Image (spheres, rainbow, N blue to C red):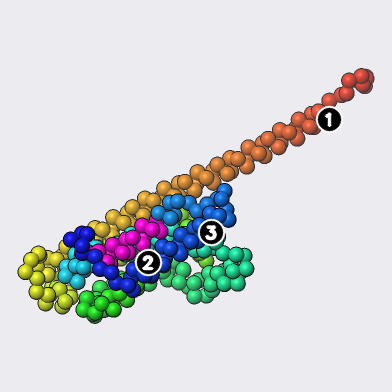
Amino acid sequence: MLLTGWSFDIEVWLPLILAAWGYMVLVRSVDRAHPANPVPRKRIWCWMAGLGLLLLATQSVIGLYDTTLFTVHMTQHLLLTMVAAPLLLLGAPVTLVLRASSAETRKRWILPVLHSRVVGVLSNPLVAWSLFAVVMWTSHFSPLFDAALDDPLIHQFEHLLYVSTALLFWWPVIGVDPAPRRLSHPMRIGYLMLGMPFSSFLGLAIFSSTSVLYTHYETLQRPWGQTPIEDQAWAGGIMWAGGDLVFFVAMLLAVVAWLRSEEVEQRRIDGMLDRQDAQTARQDQVRRASAAPTPGTALEP
């Protein structure tokens, strides 16, 4: 089933294949232009892993059973929003486009978009955090969720909405690409700490519900597996525990990144002080040499 339970929806496969191909075209362009400073291989792996997870979540056996089991559906959402989105951002696509573009293209097209009011608003950490929280809560407690389970087009729209808002949410945290507003390392940790409760409470609300929340799962005739209410409880538990785990790992990585940045800054300061000390020592040596009497010069009585 893992090998044969794949779907091949052209509206999903084609954009992802084009994204992979376009990324590698830009990588080769940058590597040719800057052989001494090529694109880091880890960024390529992160981008491709993110695209691969989008395919896995929507086109594999996970996508096949997302409308049959709520637990599978919730696993799908976690993969899309908590794993694939950060990996795509770690691929630094904006930086790659900037490096591969000509100075004229950057000045005329790319930089005006990055500095536009729309991007400025959407990249605001408060706006990005709020959009993601509102989308997640509203979609799970509104008719949209049931409608997505019954209509494939609405389901695709829901996935696009999740991934888009997740990219906005994680952008200030990842901090690899340039952004109109950058969070300091302590602010990134605080941002993640505020993000954990909305994910936890969402999972807890689903887990604690005493009635089936979605008509689709309640009326689905399935002669195997858990009852709808048991399936729903497990789905809430997956959102609760899985989301907390992702946020906890993200906070640990943010702390590590902060410590590394402090080490780099300390080495920079130490190097600057060493250069200043060396310059001062040279100046003292020159002053002493100029103050010393030359050979053959009589000393004043």
Which tag is nearer the camera, tag 1 or tag 2? Answer: 2
Find residue 16 and name its label.
2
How many neighbours does mark 3 have within 10 angstroms: few (below 14), some (14-19), or many (20 or more)? some
Mark 2 residue element: helix
Question: In the rendered image of this protein, does residue 300 appear above or below residue 248?
Answer: above
Q: What residue sits right under mark 3 in the picture?
A: 29
Identify the residue at image location x=45%, y=62%: 23
Amino acid type at mark 3:
Ser
Identify the residue at image location x=53%, y=72%: 113
Looking at the picture, tell me which residue is in the foreground, 17 or 56.
17
User: In the rendered image, which quarter is residue 228 located in?
Assistant: bottom left
Q: What residue sits right under mark 1 in the picture?
A: 290
- Which residues are the magenta region? 46-62
Q: Position of residue 254 (x, y in %)?
A: 41, 52
Marks 3 and 1 sit apart, C-alpha to C-alpha, by: 56 Å
Identify the residue at image location x=20%, y=59%: 2
Marks 2 and 3 sit apart, C-alpha to C-alpha, by: 20 Å
Which tag is nearer the camera, tag 3 or tag 1? Answer: 3
User: In the rendered image, which quarter is residue 19 located in?
Assistant: bottom left
Q: Position of residue 242 (x, y in %)?
A: 26, 58
Find residue 126 and name its label.
none
Q: Position of residue 178 (x, y in %)?
A: 51, 62
The reply, left or right, for residue 179 in relation to residue 197 is right
Q: Quadrant of the N terminus?
A: bottom left
C-beta proximity under 8 Å, tags 2 and 3: no
The reply, left or right, for residue 145 in relation to residue 93 is left
Amino acid type at mark 1:
Ser
C-beta proximity under 8 Å, tags 1 and 2: no
Q: Is residue 145 visible?
A: yes
